[in-house]
Image: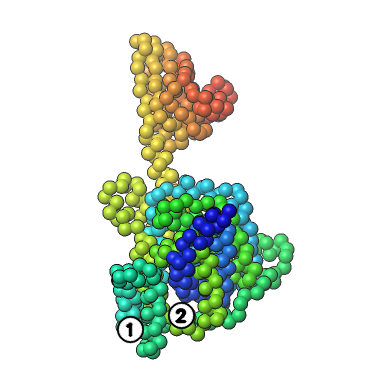
Amino acid sequence: MYEKFKQSWLSNLKGDSLAGIVVALALIPEAIAFSIIAGVDPKVGLYASFAICVIIAFTGGRSGMISGATGAMALLMITLVKDHGLEYLLAATLLTGVLQIIAGYLRLADLMRFVSRSVVTGFVNALAILIFMSQLPELTDVTWHVYAMTLAGLAIIYGFPYVPVIGKAIPSPLVCIVVLTVVYMVTGMEIRSVGDMGELPDTLPVFLWPNVPLNFETLMIILPYSIMLTVVGLLESMMTATIIDDLTDTKSDKSRECKGQGVANIGAGLIGGMAGCAMIGQSVINIKSGGRRRTSSLIAGVVLLLMVVFLADWVSQIPMAALVAVMIMVAIGTFSWESIRDLKKHPMSTNFVMVATVVATVGTHNLAIGVFVGVLLAAMFFANKVGNIMYIGSKELEAGKEREYQVVGQVFFASSERFLAAFDFKESIDKVTINLSKAHFWDITAVQALDRVVIKFRREGTEVELVGLSEASATVVDRYAVHNDPEAVEKLMGGH
């Protein structure tokens, strides 16, 4: 037990501590910005990020992953807050947590296996683009000082690791934030700082039960929003977990992560926070800064709260340019540059799925829509590819009397038309044998295609014999085939 605890919490204490501090600094402006997007007070996002970070450290299924208030979730809250207010948002957050716990026990995370690698790559690239685009307002209509500070920050981030001895010991994003904050405070230059984004909370969070009527009407108001928050939250969390799995070459427990996210959202809702999920940007910052264990998430949450409550005067002095530099680093590090080079090597269908996922996600700013488009296209391309891997050959066993057709491959909705077209129904012959020993029938569409073949041959006066059906195919065919039922035959063929 102690060894497991040590591995999960203490085996990378220095790296996790420094990474947690960097993540906490990066969480502050984002939590405030996402609160503004949702139309609520900045402390709602800050309290949510604190609660989710701390709770997920204990309940989550992916070490090193950071969760908190996110833009994808905030976008879904706008209408609810506008029409019904903060209290209903808190109630929706609690219900979201419950639904996510249920999803965890139902092992809905297993559905991630249907998301192809090209969709994940498109998702990663889209997030990198969105992260970069989210920084553009801070770089638009500003003085040259902002550009100078941002470039200086990037120079520190990418140059500091080459400094002997300390370059590898201290995370360069942390150095960037500290150095640029000192420069800002010493020079007094007129640029935006964290304090300009909103008022920071000055008290610790307290238990807060949503002040809404506990009735069916309230449930009908919050349920649609909670379902959307649940789907988007789990989708982003599972995608982020997959990315961190790749970055760290380790595995995660996706079902536990679902349940952990649910518990964390319930905790956030009970202290006045909004619903959240895994954060790709902060998770990459954490990994790049040396965070690997649960300790980094715990420290990030605790340091975040301590800084905004007790060190608000100092935190408010952090120039936004420093955080913009950090987020640009995240965007560059998140983007899969290999995918650009692989465009020449990968099949056109794979490239199309990846690009479509990027375009749909960036165009709608909605993760769920982007992933849905990618998964749908990948499924269509796959079905088309498998449908084309089917061969039907024939040989004459006895001249003018008997012919055998050999079916090889998968027969389902995408290949049923090719299956039908392979038979010559007008040939004058006494008997046809259809050898299905190397074929597999998957669905009702395939069975109906087989029915049509048998019926058409019989209408031409040809005897038909089916041989070689595997046990799995026979189960489907015996259950749904109608070629031996005269009434059903007439209905199937539509009188033709």
Decide: is 252 above or below 49.
above
Can residue 309 be seen in this snapshot? yes
Q: Which residue is mark 1?
A: 145
Task: Name the N-terminal-most of marks 1 and 2.
Answer: 1
Please give the name of the residue rendered at 45% of the width and 69% of the height, measured from the top-left corner. 18
Q: Residue 461, percent across and down?
A: 46, 15
Name the residue: 65% across, 66% down: 91
- Mark 2 burial class by Cα count in 10 Å: few <14, some 14-19, many 20+: many
Q: Nearer the viewer, residue 61 or 96?
A: 61
Residue at figure coordinates x 37%, y 80% from the top left? 180
Could one spot residue 190 in this view of the protein? no
Q: Please say if 226 is above or below 302.
A: above
Which residue lies under the disc numbered 2? Answer: 194
The part of the image, by quadrant, that contains residue 227 is bottom right
- Colouring rule applied to residues: rainbow
In the visual, does 194 lie left or right of 391? right
Numbered label tally:
2
Residue 277's spot in the image, x, y percent?
A: 53, 62
**Residue 306 sits above or below residue 382 on the image:** below
Crowding near pointer 1: few (<14 within 10 Å), some, many (20+)?
few
Q: Amino acid at mark 1?
A: His
Front residue of 321 and 414? 321
- Horizontal placement of 286 versus 476: left or right? left
**Which label sits on residue 23?**
none
In the figure, is residue 52 to the left or right of 435?
Answer: right
* Type of amino acid under label 2: Val
Q: Residue at x 41, y 66 (%)?
A: 289
245 relative position to 60: left or right: left
- Label 2: element kind: helix
Residue 132 x, y percent position in the rendering: 38, 68
Q: Secondary structure at mark 1?
A: helix
| Alpha carbon distance from label 1 to label 2 | 16 Å
